[in-house]
Image (cartoon, rainbow, N blue to C red):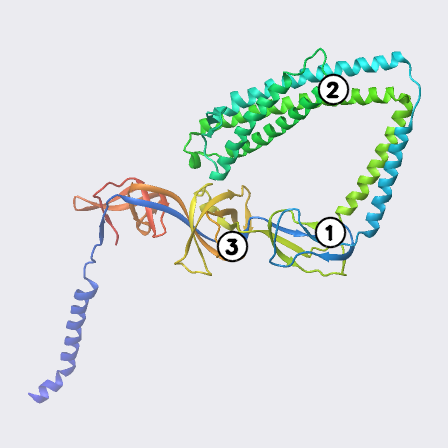
Amino acid sequence: MRRSFKKHLYIYIIAVVVIVAVAVYFILVNKAPVEQTLVIHPADFVSTVSVSGKVVAVQNADLGFDQSGRISSINVKVGDIVKAGATLASTDSADIRANILQKQAALDRERAKLAALHAGNKPEEVAVYQQKYDDAGTAFVIAMKSAYLQTEDAIKNKADSLFTNGDSVNPTLNVTTQSDTEKKSVEWERTMLRDKLTAWKNALSLVSVDSSPVAAITKVKSITADSLLSVKSFYDHLGSIVSNLSPGNSGLLQTAIDTYKATVSAGAQGAATAASLEQTADANWSSARDALILIKSGSTVQDIDAQLATIRAAEADLQNVQAQLTKTKVVAPFDGIVTKMDTKVGEIISPAMSEISMMSDGAFQIESYVPEINIAAIVLDDHAKVTLDAYGEDVPFAATVISIDPAETIRDGVSTYKIKLQFDQNDQRVKSGMTANVIITTSEISNAITVPQGIIVNKGGQKFVIVKRGGVNTEVPVSTGGVSTLGRINVTSGLNDGDIVIIK
């Protein structure tokens, strides 16, 4: 038996190997796959776009001198907070100041010559200029009254359509503003205009088109000019407010916003027309008055005209030298912080050099570049969550999309579009140059049907999802929308609540 076992040992080994192989095949290879499914139920869906960007100041400026010179004073240092118009640095200006004194003296001399010109004039010539002056005064009174009526219409019949109780001591603006301070400011301006229009109307009642003393016209002229200036400022402010309106930030329909804009534009145009009418009449009256004064002084028209031309030339010379003086200073173009001051007293500077820089104080934005595949989903006023590398993901900041470049920017051979986001609040932790990670919310949908993006099958340009219906797997065509940061895609048609989709 032992000899028989050894004789058939190889046969037994081969048989065992075959049996094991067959068992492995049936256990592992031929085992049916387990089907994984997902039951569809509606849920809230948020579509986002994630980008990175860099924090920048709202305003940046590299500053320099308009002409060469030696630095004589530096008034600020890096980190100083300055107001618009403040002198940051200046070059030596002693020669220019001396030249200004010479030009001023020359101008005074020519004005003295004009005062000294006296020549006889005929009474009839004086009478002609007197009549022109009287006519100009009449026209000026008419123009001021017309300007008042047009301005009153622009305020009470147009601007007041945006207010409740507009012509009262407590007007209330009825449209959304950027801040409560802005709202209170324009309401205060409307209150002031009520008083100014009343004073203007009362002053006009004291003058007539037939004859009015110079003092009365001059008083009305002063009140008129002040009122028109206030009206222009008021409409500039009101125009800025309505230009910022949108359905998103005001809750108004676009048609209502367009109506407000048209009303403000018409009112501003009416006020501007009134101001132009008054200014033209004022210029004519002043010119006629000056001509009458000159003709009464005894000088000939030709002599006076020649001397006036000489005075204008002297004034131009003085203004030219004064302009050169302004070029010896670098002034702050806006309120902000000095970020660079790479010059020192005694150094020779040239216009080609930019040794001084500023950025706006406190207000920062984020600049980012969005690939063209995502840019269509982003619109103005989209909200975003921002994290900064400096503080990590646990410190979020809120921001809003404020601009989208219409033209592409090529970066690494890819078309991208530059966008800017404004931080919703000023935060001292935010600094220029920080790296920002931005998640922009492009849409929010309630009761949306969503599935994992990876189970969508594309065939011949059509998208399908495998659905188990009646125990049979069926390819169902679907339409899709946005994709969430979790990788789920919004199915806009094709699937219903309770459908069972095949995941794997």
Residue 155 as seen in the image, left or right of residue 214: left
Foreground label between 3 and 2: 2
Q: Residue at x 77, y 43 (%)?
A: 323
Residue 478 as seen in the image, left or right of residue 116: left
Report x, y in % for residue 324.
79, 46
Report x, y in % for residue 205.
63, 16
Q: Secondary structure at mark 2?
A: helix
Give the mark nearest the N terminus, 3 or 1.
3
- Figure quadrant of the N terminus: bottom left
Residue hosting label 1: 65
Residue hosting label 2: 214
Q: Is residue 159 visible?
A: yes
| Amino acid type assigned to the residue bearing label 2 in the image | Val
State the residue in front, 15 or 498.
Answer: 498
Residue hosting label 3: 54
Using the numbered discs, state the Cα–Cα distance from disc 1 to disc 2 in whole angstroms: 48 Å
Using the numbered discs, state the Cα–Cα distance from disc 3 to disc 2 in whole angstroms: 64 Å
